[in-house]
Amino acid sequence: MSKNIEWKKTTLSNLVTEKDGIKRGPWGGSIKKSFFVNEGYKIYEQKNVIENNFLIGNYYISEDKYKELQSFEIHEGDILVTGAGTIGKIAVVPKEFKKGIINQALLRIRLDEKKVYKKFFIYLLKFFSVVLNQTYIKGSGLKNLSSINIIKNFPITIPFKNGYPDIGEQKRIADEIELLFLEIDKGILFTSKSIEDLKKILWTEVDNLIIRNLNNDWEYFELGCIANKITDGTHKTPKYITNGVPFITTINVVPFHDYFDFDSYIKFISEEEHKELLKRTNPEKGDLLLSKCGTIGRTQVIRVDYEFSIFVGLMLIKLKKDLIYPKFLEYFFNHPAIKMILEDISTGATRATLPISVLKKFKIPLPLKENKPDIKQQKSIVKKLDDISLEVNKLHKKLKEQLQNFELLKQSILTEAFQGKL
């Protein structure tokens, strides 16, 4: 670094073009669904930025509406930043894109490239987005940048030379960061592939031990023949209350876990309504829950001791415990190939649904002993799969930690870069 270079504080508003340098998408009723048309000018959303893909999305407005909202249009090279929900994701508008505007969840930044090198600025924005999320974000439910002034006046530090922003030093730093990040990204790519390969190990064993087992002492049984009851949850939306009996939906089902997932969604119903619903379905420990709508085939053995009721999207399967070991079926139904089959045999034009009558006839491969399903062998297979799953989960945890370390390494590189130490 040259001795003449000095790092000085400035604000984002000093680095953008004078007119509309920082612009948030239109608020309120400016973009309503009633304004949408089949073809026209595109509305760019959060997902375009999060996935860095300007081809996805199907919302359009007419030419008249576009002219009304033209101050929100995007140009090649504009920097778009997510400003609600997932905060601080960044994408640059590519050379080829469909003419359109940003929606209310996006910020558009147009840099004065005489003052700041674009690649340097993007790295700078990634670095400060951590601080932004921790300090300035509002909203207890959906996080939200409460004011555009937060962005405009956000303090940042950049290299100056002879009283002016030093573009050459900015480029040097950006190129250094890019080279370092390229090496880290190789590690991220390799680790991510290892995680994907790891996921396949367990299902390959399920494939070998259950689905494609060609031993002569195996036979197919219809699910209806090895179950005492197969039904689904209530078809009527209950009256929800603040606290009461848990009301379980597909979202709450977590295969192979001892609990239901209430982190993102939880509903309760009254004791009285629960007792009424028990007449239709009476979920008990050891029964199976299987999703039959939307995400089809997600299966979990009930392992909780408390009472709950279920919604229409879940099937309740009460097994004949002398013929079938519940976790054996949990492995079977959660296999990706079996889930695909269940999706294929589901019905419904708009929302796929697996009919109970179809599931009852679904054939399950089971080991035999004296012409009856062999529970002991089923448990032995489950034990082998549990052991493999345990080792896979240990490795998965290590690989996920490795990915986190890569991201921490990137952040430490950015820290050094923007303290003038790179």
Image: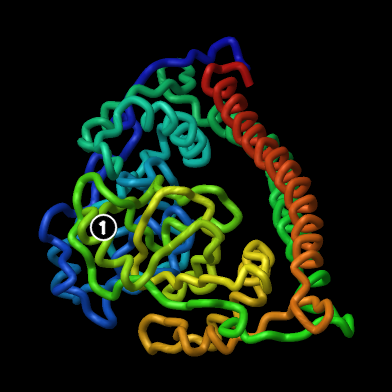
Q: Quadrant of residue 114?
A: top left
> Residue 407 at x, y = what percent?
60, 35
x and y percent of residue 295 in the render?
47, 70
Q: Quadrant of residue 351?
A: bottom left
Q: Position of residue 48 (x, y in %)?
A: 41, 60
Q: Residue furthest right?
A: 216
In this image, 126 relative to 265: left or right? right
* Figure check: 152 above or below 313: above
In the rendered image, the vertical position of residue 403 relative to residue 65, given as above or below: above
**Residue hosting label 1:** 103
In the figure, 308 relative to 13: above or below? below
Q: For this view, does 235 lie left or right of residue 285?
A: left
- Which residue is rendered at x = 46% and y = 70% of the image? 316
Identify the element where label 1 is drawn: loop
Q: Give 224 or 161, whichever is nearer the viewer.
A: 224
Amino acid of disc 1: Asn
Q: Nearer the viewer, residue 309 or 337?
A: 309
**Residue at point 24% right, 47% down?**
24
Residue 211 x %, y %: 75, 76
Quadrant where the N terminus is found in the figure: top right
Q: Is residue 146 visible?
A: yes
- Residue under the image location 63 percent in, 68 percent down: 321
Residue at (18% x, 71% y) in the render: 33
Give the left or right position of residue 399, taking residue 313 as reference.
right
Quadrant of the snapshot with the C terminus: top right
Residue in the foreground of this view, choosing between 366 and 130: 366
